[in-house]
Amino acid sequence: MSFVPALIVLLKKLWQATPFQYFAVYWIINGLMNIMFLVEGLNKRFIEVASVIYNALDIPMMVGIIYLAAFSPAIKKFIRIGMVVFVLFEIVCLASSGLRYDALKYALGLGLIFILTIIIWQISLYLQQVVYATREKALLLIHGALLFQYGTYIVVYIFDYFLSGSSVADNIDKFLIYYISTILSIGIGCSGLLLKGLHKLPATTALRKSFWAESRETPV
């Protein structure tokens, strides 16, 4: 399922015209990590290190993608400052605890709050527009998918770092929540990529200029 957005982007020839390529690449990486966790026989220490590295990079990657797709200078400034603080906090946590699963316990909690704030802020800006271009409709759906995905990740985060001594049944429930939320969020994101007319849009730079020109002229 994680590879479907990339397939849609490829078939609709969206790689050069829009920023949706970044979201597709992110979901590809997510899918590759999930496949690795399902492979039997891998060294447990290798899986732990890979999990820590992926968890450390996940939020910075997604925040970076949102930054590239964002139009608001205020959001971009907030992201730049917040990213520096978050990455430094992650480095301190990893330096003090090493590549252990619990090393990012508090950093990931902060990261979830950080990225959910950005997503909600971005969605609120899209909702303030009187008229929606096809691109904005697609990005609104994708940000809605991300809000659902990272919102449910809070439950997984609590299970992982605060209820780690729970029963096997609870751990199964945790993975079910994770995979179901991932499938649903990718499905919502794909509905945005499938909107008609995306392949006819101009380059990202031109879109940004036209968006801000229209938003200055359009009363909110």
Image: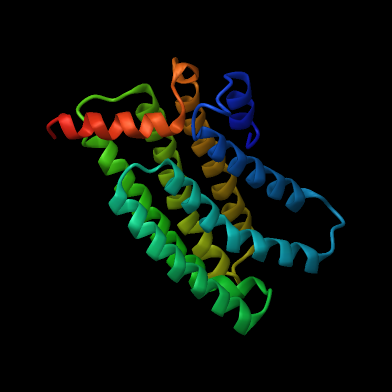
Image spot of residue 45 (x, y percent): 79, 69
Q: How is the image coloured?
A: rainbow
Residues 213 and 177: in front is: 213
Is 84 placed left or right of 92 in the picture?
A: left
142, above or below 166, in the image: above
Q: Is residue 162 visible?
A: no
147, above or below 159, in the image: above
Which image quadrant: the N terminus?
top right
Q: Residue at x 58, y 36 (%)?
A: 24
Image spot of residue 5 (x, y percent): 58, 31
Q: Residue at x 63, y 54 (%)?
A: 172
Image spot of residue 57 (x, y percent): 59, 59
55, above or below 164, in the image: above
Q: Residue furthest left?
A: 219
Q: Residue at x 27, y 35 (%)?
A: 212
Is 130 placed left or right of 185 in the picture?
A: left
Q: Residue at x 50, y 18 (%)?
A: 199
Q: Residue furthest bottom?
A: 96
Is 30 placed left or right of 187 in the picture?
A: right
Q: Is residue 114 visible?
A: yes
Which image quadrant: the C terminus?
top left
Image spot of residue 36 (x, y percent): 76, 50
Count of all numbered marks drawn on residues in the image: 0
The quadrant holding residue 115 is bottom left
Residues 123 and 44: in front is: 123
Residues 148 and 118: in front is: 118
